[in-house]
Image (cartoon, grey):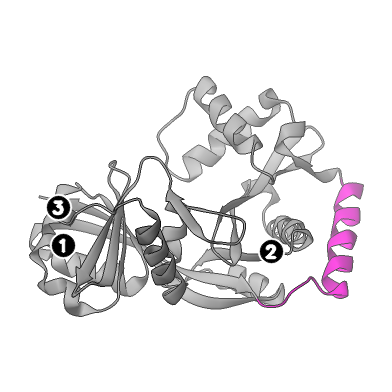
Amino acid sequence: MLEPLKRDKVWMKTIEQYLNKNYWQAASFYQIFQLDPTGEVIGLIDGFEVYPVTEQLEIIGLIASNGKGLTLVHFMDLRVKSKYNVLKTLISLKTNCLKGNLFSVDVAKQILEKSLIETNDEDYYWMAFEGQILSEFQQSKLTEKLNAYSKNGISLSLASEIDFNQMVPFLIEVEKNFNRNPLSVNQLKKKMNERSNLDAYLLVMYKEQVIGQGLLEYSLSGHRLVGGIYVIEAFRHKGIGNLITLALCQLLFEKHTLPALTVESGNDIAMKLYEHAGFKIKGDLKTSYIKMR
């Protein structure tokens, strides 16, 4: 089995260089590392272990696990297929969800081929905003949208400003939509308290009802991930998702940070929406739910 990553400054610097070299291909790994304000890797978040794959002192791949079935993978090339300790590590981690760029996930499944019973894939693209600031047109468009929606009783608010009891029906729907295990009200409240501590967790309100959400998630070295965007069915196809995206982007630009996001590869409507807002495709991302013998 591969040896876990040593958490010293030398290895953290080596990992930082590896991630910068493979920025969009290994972008999913940024969620498990702690970064300082300059984007330097300074630590690993609790709950994850990282296993470097090396050859002649060169890192040729990374495997990371949360110990609960989620395994992140990034491989430079096919050399990892000849390493038996990679197979042993993937099996010992009791993986049920592989995540990484398309090439790496497919290679991992090839390595696990004799152990796999079932796979179910979801393909995405990484998209990033190209530019330094929102154009005057986009800023005025956001202001116009907010004004137009407010006339119809729709507004944006920070989650910390909304009473939790107003959120419960919406939060339950979100959990169901993403096929997550049902949470008790107390568990939902704890989750909301954690999210409310984020510097930007926005809720869309229709009068007193929560109808949508969006938040800023983890940081890459040069970008911040815009995610968690969800709008209830009765209010879809009204541009609310675009409204949330633009609002979160504006918050990032005020902090001189560039936004990035992921979008399903077959969601042409969303891709066109984001491209119109100034985003460009930068790389691919794959999530593969697997079942092993």
Q: Can you identify the residue that label 1 sits on?
A: 86
**N-term-proximal mark, 2 vs 1:** 1
Per the image, the residue denoted by label 3 is: 91
Q: Is residue 270 left or right of residue 118?
A: right
Specify the amino acid type for callout 3.
Ile
Is-magenta flag for residue 134? yes
Q: Which residues are magenta?
A: 130-152
Q: Position of residue 131 (x, y in %)?
A: 71, 77
C-alpha gap between disc 3 and disc 2: 39 Å
Q: Residue 265: where, in percent of width, then height?
A: 47, 71
x then y, percent, for residue 268: 56, 73
The answer to which quarter of the image holds residue 29 is bottom left
Camera-near label (3 vs 2) is: 2
> Dot 3, crowdedness within 10 Å: few (<14), some or many (≥20)?
some
How many angstroms separate mark 1 from mark 3 (CA)? Answer: 9 Å
Instruction: Return the x and y of residue 251 as percentages of the image width and height.
Output: 75, 56
Q: Decide which of tag 1 and tag 3 comes sooner along the chain.
A: 1
Amino acid type of the residue that numbered disc 1 sits on in the rendered structure: Val
- Above or below 211: residue 241: below
Nearest to the observer: residue 165 or residue 67 = 67
Q: For the residue carrying disc 1, how many other residues have a C-alpha within 10 Å: few (<14), some (14-19), or many (20+)?
A: many
Kindly identify which residue carries mark 2. Answer: 257
Q: Please state which amino acid type lies under the numbered disc 2.
A: Thr
